Amino acid sequence: MPFVTAGDPDLDFTADLLIEFQNRGAAMVELGIPFSDPVADGPVIQSSYTRALGSGLKLKKVFDWMRDLRSSLHIPVVTMVSYSIVYRQSPERYVKAAKDAGFDGAIIPDLPPDEGDAVIRAARADSFDTIFLVAPTTPPLRRRHIVANCTGFVYYVSVTGITGARDSLPDHVIENIDELKTLTDVPICVGFGVSNPQQAEMLARHADGVIVGSAIVKMLEAAKSLPPKDLLAKVGDFVGELVLGTAEGGQARA
């Protein structure tokens, strides 16, 4: 599952990216809704939010854009969105607007499920997925509570801290993924720190999905001087390698 920020560098290119990801075999896309004070995101994604907001991007514009793009996509798209944005709209209005625009669910990293009754009720009423995060430090009893409120998938955070590509992942990742799978039939997807096809293949031997964000966003920023067509191909090639890695890991698990 690739992650990109809506509107970085602009929504037209973001649309091209989502279609490219789909064509490269991505099963789902996570779209970051830019916010001035992100909670879980590291400097790479924070910078992309700043660039998008600096261009005047607003939530309504993202929803209108997605409504126009949706017919070109057959894979699910979920938002990574701060609860501040949801709260300002009201959970009911946010869920309805996101669903009507064509989004399939929301990851709300700063909303604990035990404080999210309004969002969960609105989402269930509109067949909209709620995805909550489980961290390596989450106690066993709380893990059960979190996964019980997840639909779509459970987002397992592979590292303690913020988003960002890592050269290696902690030893406890696999053990925690396997433990989560005993608690729910909802797919377990792993994010934070995944940066290369080898890590994706390793994780796919145990998890149902692998999320890669900072490595993609960093590539977009580093290669921004390339012509758009070449930049799209460069990022597409990388996502294609990640897809191949997860496929090989999934085959090994099967």
Image (cartoon, helix red, strand yellow):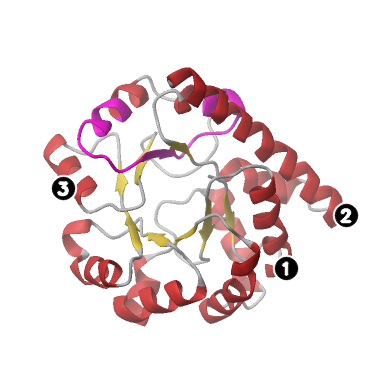
Q: Which residues are magenta?
A: 177-201
Residue receiving disc 1:
12
* Residue at x-position 74% and y-position 38%: 237
Residue receiving disc 3:
145
Q: Is residue 116 above or below residue 217?
A: below
Counting other residues with Cα less than 10 Å from the Cα at mark 3, is it few (<14), some (14-19), or many (20 or more)?
A: few
Residue receiving disc 2:
227
Counting other residues with Cα less than 10 Å from the Cα at mark 2, is it few (<14), some (14-19), or many (20 or more)?
A: few
Residue 134 appears left or right of 78: left
Percent from the top left, x then y, of residue 180?
Answer: 26, 33
Q: Nearer the viewer, residue 35 or 250?
A: 250
Could you tell me how far apart the alpha carbons at marks 3 and 1 are, in whole angstroms?
Answer: 39 Å
Query: Sequence-wise, which precedes: disc 3 or disc 2?
Result: 3
Counting other residues with Cα less than 10 Å from the Cα at mark 1, is it few (<14), some (14-19), or many (20 or more)?
A: few
* Residue at x-position 68% and y-position 63%: 15
Type of the residue with mark 3: His
Q: Is residue 186 magenta?
A: yes
Q: Tell me, yes or no, if residue 168 can be seen here.
A: no
Q: Secondary structure at mark 2?
A: loop
Q: Secondary structure at mark 3?
A: helix
* Residue at x-position 44% and y-position 73%: 98
Q: Residue furthest right?
A: 227
Type of the residue with mark 2: Pro
Foreground disc of the pair 2, 1 = 1
Q: Is residue 182 above or below residue 252?
A: below
